[in-house]
Image (cartoon, rainbow, N blue to C red):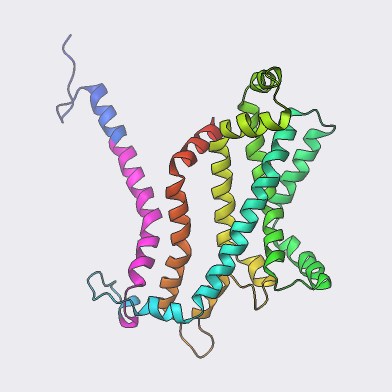
C-alpha cells in the first residue's frame, strides 16, 4: 500500500519523528538560553561603563573596559580570594578523606542500625542551615574561634559529609564484593585492597562528590557571613562591598566583575574533571 504523506511531504511516522525532534531541540535551546543568558549578561556587564550597565533597552554594542576588574583588585580581592581557597580546599580534602572511608565501611561491613545511621546522616544535610547557624555561632564564640578560617572549614566539613557518604556508599555498593575477596586471596589487607582496588574503581564517584563539595564550599554565604568575622571573609561575603547602602548606589560593573571572579574557578575545576564528572553522574543515575 502507498504510504500517506502529510502536507510537508513526510510520511506519517517520519513527520511525527521530525516534530518530536524539533520540539526536543526547542526545549534544549530554551533550557540552554535560560541557563547561559544570566551568566553572559553578568560577563558583559563586567566590561561595561556605569552608564551602559543599566541602560534600557540593553546595550549590546559598547566600548569594553577593564576598569571594573582593576577596581575589584584594589578592593582587597586577594584577601578574600585566598580565604576562599583555604576554606574550600581544606574542607573538600578533609571531607573526602573522612567521607570515602566512612561510605566504604557502611557499604561493606555489617553495622547495627545501619539504616537508622544513614537516615540520621541524611537528616543533618536536609535540615535548613539556619537551624545550625545560631548554635554554631554560640559554640564558636565560647571557643573563641569566630573569625578563624579553621572554624569555617570545620562547618563546611560537617555540611558536606552527609552528601559524600550517601553518594559514595551507592558507588561502593555497585562495585562487586568479589574484588575484595580476590584481593584478600592474593594476600592484600582490607586497607590495601581499599586503596589500590576500590578507590580507583570509585574514581568517578569521588570526582563527583569532590566537585559538589567544592561548589558548595566556594559558593556558601550564610555561615561565611556569620562565622568569618573580619579576618576570614570569603569571596561571597566580599561581594556585598558593592551593594551600596542608603546613600551609595549599587556598583553594577564591579559587582559583575566580582561575580565572574567567583564563578570562574568553579567552571575551570568542572572542566578539568569533566570526563570523570560525567561518568560519576551517569553511575549515580543508574
Quadrant where the C terminus lies? Answer: top right
- Looking at the image, the residue that sits furthest to the top is 1
Q: Nearer the viewer, residue 276 or 194?
A: 194
Q: Residue 45: within the magenta? A: yes
Q: Please determine whether, in this image, residue 166 is positioned above or below residue 111.
A: below
Quadrant where the N terminus lies? Answer: top left
Q: Residue 4: within the magenta? A: no
Q: Please determine whether, in this image, residue 187 is positioned above or below residue 204.
A: above
Residue 169 can be seen in this image: yes
Q: Nearer the viewer, residue 181 or 114?
A: 181
- Horizontal and vertical percent for residue 251? 43, 81
- Horizontal and vertical percent for residue 266? 48, 56
- Horizontal and vertical percent for residue 73? 44, 77
- Horizontal and vertical percent for residue 262? 48, 65
Residue 243 can be seen in this image: no
Which stretch did the figure color magenta?
Answer: 22-51
Q: Residue at x 72, y 54 (%)?
A: 158
Q: Nearer the viewer, residue 222 or 258?
A: 258
Q: Please determine whether, in this image, residue 150 is positioned above or below residue 72.
A: above
Q: Is 198 on the left or on the right of 127, as rendered?
A: left
Q: Residue at x 37, y 56 (%)?
A: 36
Q: Residue at x 27, y 33 (%)?
A: 19
Q: Residue at x 35, y 53 (%)?
A: 33
Amino acid at each position: 500500500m502507498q504510504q500517506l504523506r502529510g502536507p510537508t511531504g513526510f510520511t506519517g511516522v517520519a513527520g511525527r519523528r521530525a516534530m518530536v525532534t524539533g520540539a526536543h531541540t526547542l526545549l534544549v535551546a530554551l533550557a540552554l538560553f535560560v541557563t547561559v543568558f544570566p551568566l553572559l549578561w553578568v560577563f558583559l556587564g563586567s566590561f561595561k561603563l556605569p552608564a551602559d550597565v543599566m541602560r534600557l533597552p540593553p546595550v549590546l554594542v559598547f566600548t569594553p573596559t577593564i576598569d571594573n576588574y582593576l577596581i575589584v583588585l584594589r578592593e582587597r580581592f586577594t584577601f578574600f580570594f585566598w580565604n576562599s581557597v583555604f576554606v574550600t580546599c581544606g574542607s573538600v580534602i578533609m571531607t573526602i578523606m573522612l567521607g570515602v572511608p566512612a561510605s566504604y565501611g557502611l557499604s561493606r561491613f555489617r553495622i547495627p542500625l545501619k539504616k537508622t545511621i544513614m537516615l540520621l546522616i541524611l537528616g543533618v544535610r536536609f535540615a535548613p542551615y539556619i537551624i545550625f547557624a545560631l548554635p554554631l555561632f554560640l559554640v564558636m564564640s565560647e571557643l573563641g574561634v569566630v573569625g578563624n578560617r579553621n572554624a569555617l572549614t570545620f562547618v563546611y566539613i560537617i555540611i558536606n559529609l552527609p552528601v559524600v557518604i550517601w553518594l559514595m556508599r551507592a558507588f561502593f555498593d555497585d562495585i562487586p564484593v568479589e574484588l575484595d575477596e580476590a584481593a584478600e586471596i592474593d594476600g592484600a589487607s582490607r586497607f590495601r585492597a581499599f586503596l589500590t582496588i576500590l578507590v580507583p574503581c570509585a574514581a568517578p564517584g569521588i570526582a563527583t562528590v569532590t566537585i559538589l563539595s567544592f561548589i558548595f564550599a566556594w559558593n556558601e554565604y550564610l555561615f561565611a557571613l556569620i562565622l568569618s568575622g573580619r579576618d576570614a571573609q570569603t569571596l561571597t561575603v566580599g561581594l556585598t562591598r558593592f551593594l551600596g547602602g542608603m546613600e551609595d548606589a549599587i556598583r553594577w560593573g564591579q559587582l559583575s566583575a566580582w561575580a565572574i571572579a567567583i564563578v570562574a574557578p568553579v567552571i575551570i575545576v568542572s572542566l578539568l574533571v569533566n570526563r570523570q564528572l560525567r561518568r560519576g553522574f551517569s553511575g549515580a543515575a543508574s
